[in-house]
Image (cartoon, helix red, strand yellow):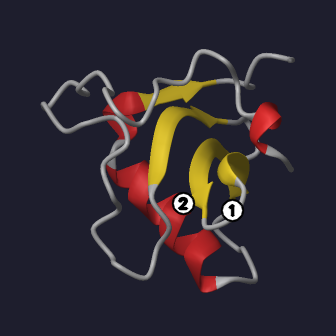
Amino acid sequence: MIEEDVPPDLPEPDAPPPLGDGTPANAPAPDPTLPETRGPAYLMPDGRIDCAVRHPSLGWIRFTAQPDDPMDYGRGLHEYWLGRSAELIHGMPPDE
């Protein structure tokens, strides 16, 4: 996906609004092996989580994390967002 695929309502990384606990919305994941991520994050009915990650060359792109993702970072991001369940939006992300 390309940067334009990121929903337009995502905050700019320079000045993200804080989440409910005061953590910036684009706070780096606690595990340094995980990519930087930001919301809004959607917990879809099938258990996958749709969010945005910062790709090293593409910038912010949409990413879907799965509990059974074949990649470690996909499973790690899924676990990270489940730990921030208060910030998860239940349902499908809006169509673009």
- Say above or below: 91 vs 67: above
The number of numbered discs placed on residues in the rendered structure image is 2
- Callout 2: SS: helix
**Sequence-wise, which precedes: disc 2 or disc 1?**
1
- Residue at 46%, 23% (x, y): give it: 11
Is 78 placed left or right of 26 in the picture? right
**The C terminus - image quarter:** top right
Residue 66, disc = 1
Nearer the observer, 90 or 23: 23
Three-letter residue code for mark 1: Gln
Q: Would residue 12 be visible to someone looking at this image?
A: yes
Nearer the observer, 32 or 43: 32
- Say above or below: 92 vs 64: above
Three-letter residue code for mark 2: His
- Say above or below: 60 vs 44: below
Residue 73: where, in percent of width, then height?
57, 76
- Residue at 50%, 72% (x, y): give it: 76
Residue ID for mark 2: 78
